[in-house]
Image: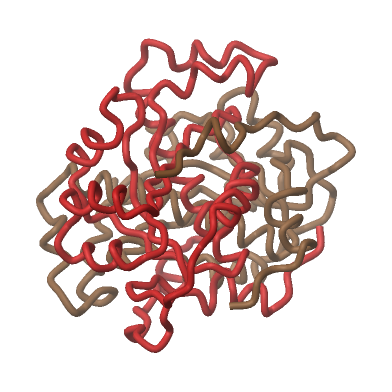
Chain colours: A red, B brown
Amino acid sequence: MEPLTDAALDTLFREARSFSYWLDRPVGDDQLRAIYELTKWGPTAANACPMRLLFIRSPEGKARLKPVLAEGNVDKCMSAPVVAVIAMDMAFYEALPRLFPHTDARSWYAGKPEAIHNAAFRNSTLQGAYFMLAARALGLDCGPMSGFDGEALNGEFFPDGRWKANFICAIGYGDRDRLHPRGPRLDFDEACSLL
Amino acid sequence: MEPLTDAALDTLFREARSFSYWLDRPVGDDQLRAIYELTKWGPTAANACPMRLLFIRSPEGKARLKPVLAEGNVDKCMSAPVVAVIAMDMAFYEALPRLFPHTDARSWYAGKPEAIHNAAFRNSTLQGAYFMLAARALGLDCGPMSGFDGEALNGEFFPDGRWKANFICAIGYGDRDRLHPRGPRLDFDEACSLL
């Protein structure tokens, strides 16, 4: 496969930032669909694709979201064009006969709550990362957040209990003039070993 | 930021695949460092960066890995130039005074096993996805796997208990001639809602 250009690596990794302030520039539903159409190709265990996305962009939807947010995340979310709830379908394994038909992968999970939780959490998180990098790849910016009341969010938006929130992510065009300095990262030798 | 080209979107998402068979083409330590130098910029909660990477590429390292693998993953790993163990540092919060200095984020985790587990698992998984897309961005291919005995792997490679394996990922140049047909994905309307 063709390696990416330096400009593309900047867009995805080196110059990308997490934003708290947003330009007054809308994000259309066609863009949300385009993000998903890239995200969906990322790998998951047994192709189970457990991530589900709730895109909140109407004033009514945001009003329902506001009370479940940590105080420090209210303005970030209310001012963003879209807030995506990256959720996991706790019955994801029901789709495995279609998504991974060549073996009985459903039986690896059905009736096994710990296996369900671990696979839903790990693989919906992987897909959440694909989602953020897909948004960046299409020229958008992200503001991921874990600061919210998960039980309250689930009760408000997913009352039947099948979907559970994993994290949330504001989507829009970030205001670079209002970024803080970037946090440091661990060096290779701190985070990695070679064997 | 500059959106990516169609060719770059193919490399990252649309034409990328998970590989089980590898070309006889080596991967150098400089390439592993280059992957990390992109991966490290991806966002994590409170910039905690809990992922740790063990790159196994020597015959001795692979011999230690082999007995902990699920049977179906042995050949995939033994034939790959490198197998990366994507792990999480269960004491990641000790670095927060340096990585996120403007507040006492260490206190959100220290002595709170559930908060530690959730943050380590979620954020090391996000970083694992950044790692795979960074590898692809540099022209490499991935083969992620969850099929291994986690306790046995941790006991063999991380005996002090601080790092825990999350998933493993073979890295190399995949053999496209030996790919199976690609699995289907969920449609936008199956996986997403708009509010």
Quarter of the figure that contains the N terminus of chain A: bottom right
Q: Residue at x 46, y 66 (%)?
A: B42
Residue B166 seen in render? no
Q: Position of residue B191 (x, y in %)?
A: 51, 34
Left or right, A42 with reference to B102: right
Residue A78, position as x, y percentages in the image = 28, 63
Q: Of all residues shown, which one is farthest toward the right?
A: B177
Please name the residue shown 55% across and 58% down the image.
B131
Which image quadrant: the C terminus of chain A? bottom right
Residue B19 visible in image:
yes
Which image quadrant for residue A14?
bottom right
Residue B122 in the image, given as x and y percentages of width and height: 36, 48
Horizontal and vertical percent position of residue B95: 25, 69
Q: Nearer the viewer, residue A74 or B182?
A: A74
Could you say which is closer to the camera, residue A149 or residue A108? A149
The total of numbered circles placed on residues is: 0
Residue closer to the observer: B98 or A23? A23
